[in-house]
Amino acid sequence: MSDPLIIAVPKGRILAEAAPLLAAAGIEPEAAFTDEGSRALRFATSNPGIDLIRVRAFDVATFVAHGAAHLGIVGSDVLAEFDYSELYAPVDLGIGHCRISVAEPAAMAEHDDPRGWSHVRIATKYPHTTQAYFAARGVQAECVKLNGAMELAPTLGLAPRIVDLVSSGRTLKENGLVEVAVIAEVTSRLVVNRAAFKTRPELMPLVEAFRRAVDAKVAA
Ligand SMILES: Nc1ncnc2c1ncn2[C@@H]1O[C@H](COP(=O)(O)OP(=O)(O)OP(=O)(O)O)[C@@H](O)[C@H]1O
Ligand SMILES: O=P(O)(O)OC[C@H]1O[C@H](OP(=O)(O)OP(=O)(O)O)[C@H](O)[C@@H]1O
């Protein structure tokens, strides 16, 4: 028998939305998987041919692209930032809905015209996405890379604008910022390592099981 298939799932907010989809696709992980207190990183499932690993959202793409995991669940924000050619993203899972946007202090937005920008300094976790977005508009973007709490950057003078994920808008509001442009809508995708897809025949029915689980959720 070949080694188990490894599915990489991000810890954090996606995990709660992903768990019912995994169950609907016939993957029942051991209880520790959804226990935030557990320090384990690899988990058995009801299927002896499938194990789950719980990693940081950005690392899901890295594990799958390098073939260390065969399948993964990852936000389209992460996929766009890395643009790994080894990843095939066949199913939009319809979870993790948000958008990636440009934001700035409310007072600045009152007399700011994005059409007049020629050079911008941006604090973000997404420097490639940011540069590509602005370059397509003829604007040079200088990025300051942060891993979180981007919203602090404008008031502390690190960068006047940020590019970050927005869902309810509450984080921006509570930090005195407003959204001035939407770069892209974001949902989580099922990703597969392209080489593994050719060599592991069990992957195709698994991808189809996820597709059916998403269709059933949409129809419900
Ligand atoms: N507010 C949100 N609403 C909906 N989906 C979100 C939201 N924020 C993030 N996401 C999605 O969830 C993924 C993981 O985000 P999360 O905030 O849990 O990670 P993180 O805290 O940045 O991760 P880490 O702690 O590993 O750095 C994102 O890549 C995105 O696709
Ligand atoms: O528009 P909202 O509904 O307020 O959501 C947006 C926030 O959600 C994400 O952060 P998260 O809560 O995952 O925390 P993080 O800073 O640890 O990534 C994102 O980075 C924003 O800060």
Image (spheres, rainbow, N blue to C red):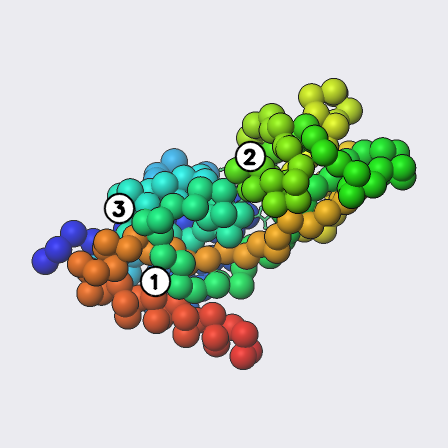
Q: Nearer the viewer, residue 159 or 71?
A: 159
Q: Which numbered dot is residue 67?
A: 3
Q: Residues within 10 Å of mark 2 (few under 14, many from 20)?
A: some
Given this view, does label 1 or label 3 mark the residue nearer the observer?
3
Residue depicted at 69% across the width and 50% down the height: 182
Q: Nearer the viewer, residue 172 or 26?
A: 172
* Occupied quadrant, residue 45: bottom left
Q: Nearer the viewer, residue 8 or 113?
A: 113
How far apart are labels 2 and 1 at the CA level? 35 Å
Disc 1 marks a residue whose amino acid type is Ile
| Residue sticking out furthest to the front | 138
| Residue sticking out furthest to the bottom | 219
Residue depicted at 54% across the width and 79% down the height: 219
* Occupied quadrant, residue 157: top right
Q: Secondary structure at mark 3?
A: loop
Disc 3 marks a residue whose amino acid type is Gly
Q: Which residue is mark 1?
A: 27
Q: Position of residue 24 (x, y in %)?
A: 41, 69
Residue depicted at 41% across the width and 49% down the height: 9
Quadrant assignment for ligand 1 = top right
How far apart are labels 2 and 3 at the CA level? 25 Å
Verify CB contact (< 8 Å) between mark 1 and mark 3.
no
Q: Secondary structure at mark 2?
A: helix
Q: Is mark 3 within 8 Å of ligand 1?
A: no
Q: Which numbered dot is residue 127?
A: 2
Q: Residues within 10 Å of mark 3 (few under 14, many from 20)?
A: some
Quadrant in which the C terminus is drawn: bottom right
Q: Position of residue 1 (x, y in %)?
A: 10, 58
Figure check: 212 above or below 156: below
